[in-house]
Image (cartoon, grey):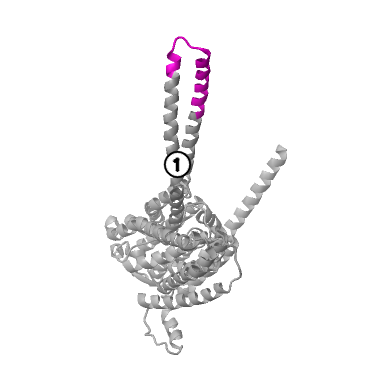
């Protein structure tokens, strides 16, 4: 029997190691392919080997973004079983790559969020190139470590920490814009708090208007179109603002071809324009869905039936979040690479750099490959290992992700999409705990009253026993009473103990795993300093090799 068990374990170990080697092989194949292409395509440029190595690091960074950050977009949908893991990976990979290639910026700021002053390099491109390489590699290594530890962290904060650390190593502490760093530190609190509050608010609204009703299906037919319309409004607004900046002039030209529409062609969409487009789509979705649900066949009056109505909206939400993420966060992988490419080709440093198509491709396909190879680990963590999710809860998290970014961007608040999504997961979990405690408060009060009454009765029995045992001359009846008192006291103590256990059991119910919270928050807090220290060490190493 034991030999069979050992054989099975060996077989599983070999299977797992084979899968791990396949993943590693595919990742290395992509990275070496990027290295080779860059080296051969830029043969006439001095420092082309440096650019090729930087491209390899950029590919490594992009894969780590795919492995870690993308989980936040599809994790809740997978955890709620609205999508299978395979379906989520395919949808996210396609839309992430599409977002990066179609709507990724033509020009990125070479220094993410202006955290360091490039004039401190004195126009010398060499230390600048070394600093960007160190920043990129440090951020990628930190993301790789966080993914292995199943900790979803912010890729933006990783690259920010990397740029800060490498900048300090290259030119001292004065190079850093500490006001900008203070804003980024503030996002550690703002992002999860806003995400959690908004997700909990939507979940409570859905419960109050639908799930707490006696006739859930009637309430669902009335309110589900409204909630999905709000989601459509929020997502379209988010997508227009964050995902269509690059192609906005072309979008306006197409819209102007429709009769009765006349829009001024601008460089990027305004907030009001995005809101109006979102509202038009939202109203359309409301009318179509309301008509569809009105003709829906009889459904079982249960929570499960209501959950199924949110499945398709969740799939759309995952796809749109992935598209917007690809358009926005691809810069985290290719921003420093674009800066290095610009510095190598032009022999100088600029605050902005154009992005060649091959650089954008490295970011887009790197994110998709990283997601497919190593994304499942974090998708499972976000989707099921923090709190239990169903479609309604996952829908609330998706709503929080889009609405929080819109609010924060208009108020100028620094936020992280990772922190918002995880904050949303925490928010729905803690709301469930609160509702559970509220629901069981009556039971707890009853148990406390029972304990108080039983204690009074126990004290009375003990006092009677004390009086009887103190008597010198006892008759048979008194001895019988003493035996009875011992039995009654034991019974009362068991009742009190049982009631206390019941109270503890009710109060101890946790819908959010505390260990997961501690690990994730710890990872968030050390992301910037960890990436910074690592980048500084890498900068000194690269400089030592080059000098």
* Mark 1 crowd level (few <14, some 14–19, many ≥20, 10 Å Cα): some
Magenta stretch, main secondary structure, is helix
The x and y percentages for residue 79 are 54, 57
The extreme top residue here reads 473
The C terminus lies in quadrant = bottom left
Q: Toward which corner of the image does residue 335 lie, by quadrant?
A: bottom left
| Res 458 visible | yes
In front of the other: 150 or 389: 389
Which residue does the numbered mark 1 point to in the structure image? Answer: 446
Give the residue displayed 39% in from the left and 61% down from the top.
132
Residue 547 within the segment the image draws in magenta: no
> Looking at the figure, which quarter contains the N terminus?
top right
Residue 543: where, in percent of width, then height?
A: 38, 56
x and y percent of residue 304 in the render? Answer: 57, 60
Closer to the camera in the image, 103 or 235: 235
Which residues make up the magenta segment?
466-491
Q: Quick check: 384 left or right of 7? A: left
Q: Is residue 269 above or below residue 227?
A: below
Position of residue 25 in the picture relative to residue 197 (left or right)? right
Residue at (51, 26) in percent of width and height: 488
Residue 482 among those drawn in magenta: yes
Q: Is residue 368 above or below residue 20?
A: below
Residue 547 appears anywhere in the view: no
Which is more toward the observer, 373 or 79?
79
């Amino acid at each position: 029997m034991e030999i069979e068990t050992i054989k099975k374990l060996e077989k599983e170990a070999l299977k797992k190691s084979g899968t791990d080697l396949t993943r590693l092989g595919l990742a290395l194949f992509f990275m070496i392919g990027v290295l080779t292409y860059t080296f051969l395509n830029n043969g006439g440029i001095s420092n082309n080997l440096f650019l090729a190595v930087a491209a390899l690091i950029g590919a490594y960074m992009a894969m780590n973004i795919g492995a870690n950050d993308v989980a936040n977009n599809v994790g809740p949908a997978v955890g709620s079983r609205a999508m299978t893991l395979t379906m989520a990976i395919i949808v996210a990979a396609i839309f992430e790559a599409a977002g990066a290639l179609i709507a990724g910026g033509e020009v990125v700021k070479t220094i993410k969020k202006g955290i360091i002053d490039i004039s401190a390099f004195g126009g010398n491109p060499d230390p600048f190139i070394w600093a960007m390489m160190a920043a990129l590699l440090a951020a990628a290594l930190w993301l790789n470590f966080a993914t292995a530890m199943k900790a979803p962290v912010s890729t933006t904060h990783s690259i920010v920490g990397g740029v800060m650390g490498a900048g300090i190593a290259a030119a001292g502490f004065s190079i850093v814009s500490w006001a900008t760093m203070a804003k980024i530190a503030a996002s550690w609190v703002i992002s999860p708090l806003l995400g959690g509050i908004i997700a909990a608010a939507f979940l409570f609204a859905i419960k109050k208007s639908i799930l707490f009703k006696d006739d859930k299906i009637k309430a669902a037919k009335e309110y589900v179109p409204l909630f999905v319309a709000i989601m459509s409004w929020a997502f379209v607004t988010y997508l227009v603002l964050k995902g269509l900046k690059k192609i906005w002039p072309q979008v306006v030209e197409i819209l102007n071809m429709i009769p009765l529409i006349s829009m001024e062609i601008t460089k990027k969409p305004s907030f009001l324009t995005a809101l109006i487009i979102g509202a038009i789509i939202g109203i359309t979705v409301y009318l179509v869905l309301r008509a569809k649900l009105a003709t829906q066949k009889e459904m079982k009056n249960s929570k499960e039936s209501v959950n199924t109505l949110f499945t398709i909206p969740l799939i759309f939400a995952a796809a749109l979040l992935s598209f917007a993420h690809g358009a926005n966060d691809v810069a985290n992988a290719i921003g420093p690479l674009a800066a290095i490419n610009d510095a190598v080709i032009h022999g100088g440093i600029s605050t902005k750099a154009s992005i060649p198509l091959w650089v954008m491709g490295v970011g887009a396909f790197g994110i998709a490959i990283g997601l497919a190879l190593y994304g499942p680990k974090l998708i499972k963590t976000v989707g099921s290992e923090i709190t239990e999710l169903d479609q309604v809860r996952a829908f609330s998290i998706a709503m929080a992700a889009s609405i929080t970014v819109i609010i924060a961007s208009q108020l100028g608040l620094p936020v992280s999409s990772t922190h918002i999504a995880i904050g949303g997961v925490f928010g729905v979990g803690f709301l469930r705990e609160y509702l559970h405690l509220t629901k069981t408060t009556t039971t707890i009060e009853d148990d406390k009253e029972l304990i108080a009454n039983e204690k009074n009765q126990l004290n009375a029995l003990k006092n009677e026993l004390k009086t009887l045992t103190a008597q010198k001359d006892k008759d048979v009846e008194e001895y019988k009473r003493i035996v009875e008192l011992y039995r009654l006291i034991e019974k009362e103590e068991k009742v009190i103990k049982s009631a206390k256990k019941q109270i503890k059991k009710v109060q101890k119910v946790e819908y959010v795993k505390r260990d997961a919270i501690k690990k994730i928050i710890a990872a968030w807090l050390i992301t910037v300093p960890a990436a910074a220290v690592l980048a500084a060490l890498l900068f000194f190493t690269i400089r030592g090799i080059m000098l």
